[in-house]
Image (cartoon, grey):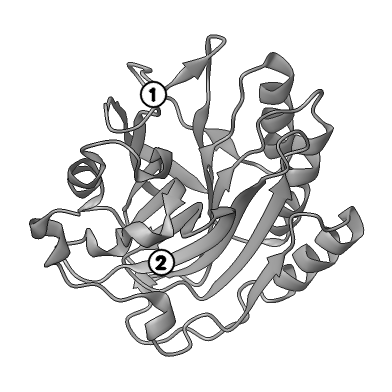
Amino acid sequence: MNGKTAKIRFKRLALLPVLLSTLLVANGRASPTELAEVANTCADHLGQLPVAEGQLLSLPLDILSWNIQKTSNTGWADDLLKLAHDRHLTFIQEAALQAQLGELQPRGPLYQSFAEGYYSGKQRTGVMTLSSSAPTMQCNFTRVEPWLGTPKAATVTEHALAGRQERLLAVNLHAINFTIGISDLQAQLGPLATLLANHDGPAILAGDFNTWSAARQQLVDSTLSVLGLVPLRFEPDLRTRFFGRPLDHIYVRGLVAEHTEVIPVTSSDHNALRARLDLAL
């Protein structure tokens, strides 16, 4: 971490008063029944938890989604500061907890919603959603890679919106990668689909979907289209590809994109996605 970013003030979620009234973590080796129970319990709390003063996201929403490759490459901190300094929501995959990503916000403290995936020694990585105001609820899910035995994570946060009764559901996903067939990916999407189906309001699902095959992309599209989510388009489409297919996506419901862009970077093996979103009429 360079000196400039280290001096920026931040607050960790754990150091604040109880801003998340419920935090449910599903173990990566949980059975489908156990995952369904966790998803249903989380769904029961949607829209039910109180909103504290200053806990509102303003519209339109500026968002970023980026697989940061475990902060392992030179220049990641400068790139994150440049890409995320004006974002209301930042969806980071392969976020390294020890990198203290919440420091990179010159406008004020960030709130960090973290779901642990890979853990080795002192390194803890997973998905992290950074937000300019505290979420009203957070639920975490993990799913083990069937070949590697390491977990991939998703975190779901709910956010109150200024001037609106409905709340925003924000899902940050790092999809499992090395599989034969699509059944494991389908199982990972299951609890997320349950929450999206039970949420009455706008929603964002962003992240690294590892959609490197036609079957995987078709599964994601078909699962989300039934729930009313549509993918954002990018022009020019400079998203990172494998086997010619983009890996990173942002899907939305009840929102329209005023602007989208892909930012090429050298500090990660994934380019970054940014968008400005407003409520659909």
Q: Is residue 229 visible?
A: yes
Residue appearing at x 43%, y 50% in the figure: 95
Mark 2 → mark 1, Cα distance in angstroms? 27 Å
Q: Residues within 10 Å of mark 2 (few under 14, many from 20)?
A: many
Residue appearing at x 40%, y 66% in the figure: 112
- Most extreme residue toward the top is 244
Q: Where is residue 80 in the image (x, y as percent from the top left)?
A: 25, 46
Name the residue nearer the viewer: 30 or 91.
30
Q: Position of residue 126 (x, y in %)?
A: 52, 52
Q: Is residue 133 above or below residue 207?
A: below
Residue appearing at x 51%, y 76% in the figure: 136
- Most extreme residue toward the bottom is 17
Task: Identify which amino acid the numbered label 1 is placed on.
Answer: Phe
- Most extreme residue toward the left is 4
Residue identifier under label 2: 112
Residue appearing at x 63%, y 63% in the figure: 140
Q: What element carries label 1?
A: loop
Task: Identify which amino acid the numbered label 2 is placed on.
Answer: Gln
Q: What element carries label 2?
A: strand
Q: Is residue 206 above or below residue 90?
A: above
| Residue 234, disc | 1
Q: Is residue 112 above or below residue 213?
A: below
Q: Which of marks 2 and 1 is in front?
A: 2
